[in-house]
């Protein structure tokens, strides 16, 4: 039973040793442990705050990306709309230009046809006049012996041709 009942001296030395250890812990150990725990707590709080800031910045960046994407979609739609409008204008311009060119070509062709027709009529008239004169000359030579009658007939034929 000696183990269960220590001696008084041993108890005193044990109390002194425990007191010294406890004193050393209170004086230097616990402040260091407390300081280390406080530093760790501050580091964790700072890390949490930085994480929250990063999350808020990330949310801001997400919103900015969303806004940029919406703006890009709007610009794309505007560009496509402008391209469609420009294509339509080009088509209309090309159609109008081809119509004008066609009308111009047709007008030129009509003018050319009219000129050629007038020229053909003049040529035919000149040929007819030449033939008429030749026929009239032959007739006059055969039928008219008198030069006065020849002159009257010639003047009459010339007046008819001129009219």
Image: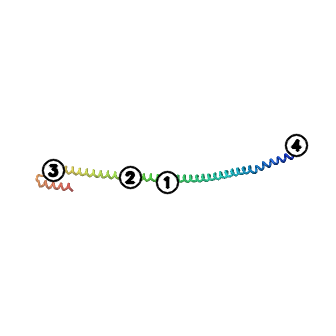
Which one is in front in this view, the residue at disc 1 or the one at disc 2? 1
Mark 4 neighbour class, 10 Å CA radius: few under 14, some 14 to 19, many 20 or more: few
Task: Tell me the CA gap for discs 3 and 1.
Answer: 86 Å
Mark 3 neighbour class, 10 Å CA radius: few under 14, some 14 to 19, many 20 or more: some
Task: Tell me the CA gap for discs 4 and 3.
Answer: 183 Å
Give coordinates of residue 95: x percent, y percent.
40, 52
Disc 1 designates what residue? 78
Task: Tell me the CA gap for discs 1 and 4.
Answer: 100 Å
What label sits on residue 28 in the rendered view? Answer: none
Dividing the picture into quadrants, the one containing residue 161 is bottom left
In-image side of 4 versus 161 (left or right): right
| Secondary structure of the residue carrying numbered label 3 | helix
What label sits on residue 97 in the rendered view? Answer: 2
In-image side of 17 versus 58 (left or right): right
Position of the C terminus, as image quadrant, is bottom left
Task: Tell me the CA gap for discs 2 and 4.
Answer: 126 Å
- Closer to the chain start, of discs 3 and 1, is 1
Viewer-proximal residue, 53 or 152?
Answer: 53
The answer to whether the residue labelled 2 contacts the one labelled 4, judged by CB atoms less than 8 Å apart, is no
Disc 4 designates what residue? 2
Give coordinates of residue 73: x percent, y percent.
53, 52
Which one is in front in this view, the residue at disc 3 or the one at disc 2? 2
Q: Residue at x 79, y 48 (%)?
A: 20
Disc 3 designates what residue? 137
């Amino acid at each position: 039973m000696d183990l269960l009942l220590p001696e008084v001296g041993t108890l005193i030395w044990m109390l002194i040793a425990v007191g010294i250890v406890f004193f050393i812990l209170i004086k230097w150990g616990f402040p260091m442990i407390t300081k280390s725990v406080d530093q760790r707590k501050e580091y964790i709080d700072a890390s949490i705050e930085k994480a929250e800031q990063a999350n808020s910045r990330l949310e801001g960046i997400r919103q900015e990306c969303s806004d940029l994407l919406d703006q890009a979609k709007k610009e794309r739609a505007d560009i496509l709309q402008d391209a469609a409008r420009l294509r339509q204008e080009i088509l209309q311009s090309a159609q109008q230009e081809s119509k004008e060119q066609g009308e111009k070509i047709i007008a030129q062709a009509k003018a050319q046809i009219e000129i050629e027709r007038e020229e053909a009529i003049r040529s035919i008239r000149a040929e007819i006049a030449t033939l008429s004169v030749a026929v009239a000359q032959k007739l006059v030579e055969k039928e008219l012996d008198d030069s006065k009658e020849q002159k009257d007939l010639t003047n009459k034929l010339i007046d008819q041709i001129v009219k």
